[in-house]
Amino acid sequence: MAKRDYYEVLGVARDAAEEDLKKAYRKLAMKWHPDRNAGNAEAEAKFKEVNEAYDTLKDAEKRAAYDRYGHAAFEGGGPGAGGGGFAGGFGGGGFEDIFEEMFGRFGGRQGGGAGRASAGRGADLRTEVQITLEEAFAGLKKTVRVPSSVSCEACSGSGAEGGSANVQQCATCRGAGKVRAQQGFFLIERTCPTCSGTGRTIKNPCKVCQGAGRVQRDRTLSVSIPAGVEDGTRIRLSGEGEAGLRGAPAGDLYVDIGIAPHALFTREGPNIMVRVPIRMAQAALGGSVEVPVIEGGRAAVKIPPGTQTGDSFRLRGKGFSVLRSAARGDMYVQIVVETPQNLTPRQRELLEAFEAESAKGDTSSPESEGFFAKVRDFWKG
C-alpha cells in the first residue's frame, strides 16, 4: 500500500512552521500512543506513521528533499533512478551526501563499509511520557512500550535462511553498495540497484522475515528520567530505535517528557510558586501560615501585620531541583487577601463597627485615604 503524504499524516499545510509541526505531532502521538490504545493494531500503525512523518519533516534538510522528491528521496530507487538519479535517499548525512551523490566521491573518498552500514540503518522512533511535577522533582525510572522492528531471531538479522553463511557479496557493486556511471562531464555515483546499498545479496531469504532481517514486535524499555527535568525535554536512547535492514545499525529512540499541571504549584525554571489565600483579619493582624513544599512536607511562613494581596515571601532552597546538580531553587509564597463572604449577623455587626470607626479619619487604610484625597483634589480642580 502506497505511503500517505507526510503533511497529510500530520494534518498540516506544506508551508507549516516548525512549531505547528511539533504541535500536530504531539497531539497525534498522544492520541495514538500504544499505552492509550492497548491491543489496537490500527492505533500502533498510525503511531508509527506519525513518528515517521515527523522524523522527516522536523529536519530541514530531510524536509527539503521530501518536498522535492517525495517518498522516493528515502527509498532504494531514489528520484530518477535508472536515469542517473540520486538513489539511496538523503536520510543519512544531509546535503553533503547529496553533493557526493551528484558529483561522486573525489579526493580519495571511496564508498565502503560505512556507506553500506548506513544504507539500511533503522529508523529513529519517538514516544512521549507524561509524568507529575513531583516525579520531575525527584527523578524516576519509567517503563515505555514501543512498537518497533527488532532483529529477526531465526536468521540472526542476516535476512538469509540458515544465517549469515548464506549471504553473498553483491556481484553488481562487488560489495561497495554503490555503482558509478559516466554522464557527460560528471561521474555519477548512486546506490546499487541490486542490493539496495547493502553490498550483499541473499540466495535463500529467511522465511520468517522474508529477507529483511527484522520483524515487527513491541518492545518494553526502562527510561531513566533525571531529577530536575523540564517539560519538553527529549531523552535519546542510542540504538533503541527500529532495527536496521539485514544487520545494519539500529536507529535511536527519542523520549519526549511532558509534565502534567499541578493543583498547587507552578514552576518557573528552578523556582516554585504557590498562591496562598488568607483571611482579611489575618492579613491585618499578622500571624503564621503553613504551606506545602514539593518534597511532601510543610513549611511555616510568617505573615507580618498589614500584608497586602500580591505580597510575596521567599523560602530559600525550597524550590525545584536543578538538573544534574545538587542545588535547588527557591519557593515563592504569593499572598491573596480574601474578602469575607456569607457573613453571620455577628460578623456583619463587627465589620460595620470597624467601618464606622475607620470613617472617622484614622490611618488604618493609608492607600485608600491617599487615593481619595487625590480624587477630591481632582474634583475641586
Image (cartoon, rainbow, N blue to C red):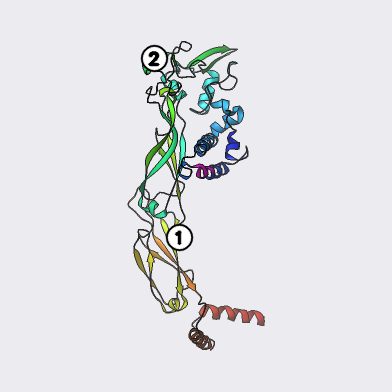
Q: Position of residue 314 (x, y in %)?
A: 40, 64
Q: Image quarter for residue 21?
A: top right
User: Judging from the image, what secondary structure is the residue with disc 1 in?
Assistant: loop
Taking the image as shown, residue 7 lies to the left or right of residue 308, namely right
Give the structural element (helix, strand or loop) at label 2: helix
Residue 316 placement (x, y as % from top left): 36, 62
Residue 30 covered by magenta stretch: yes
Q: Quadrant of residue 233?
A: top left
Q: Which residues are magenta?
A: 28-32
- Judge depth for marks 1 and 2 and give the one in front: 2
Name the residue type under label 1.
Ala
Q: CA distance from mark 1 to mark 2?
A: 61 Å
The amino acid at mark 2 is: Asn
Whether residue 359 is in magenta: the answer is no
Closer to the chain start, of discs 1 and 2, is 2
Identify the residue position indicated by label 1 in the image: 263
Residue at which label 2 appears: 166
Asked where in the image residue 181 lies, by quadrant, the reply is top right
Query: Looking at this rendering, what residue extends furthest in the top direction?
Result: 171
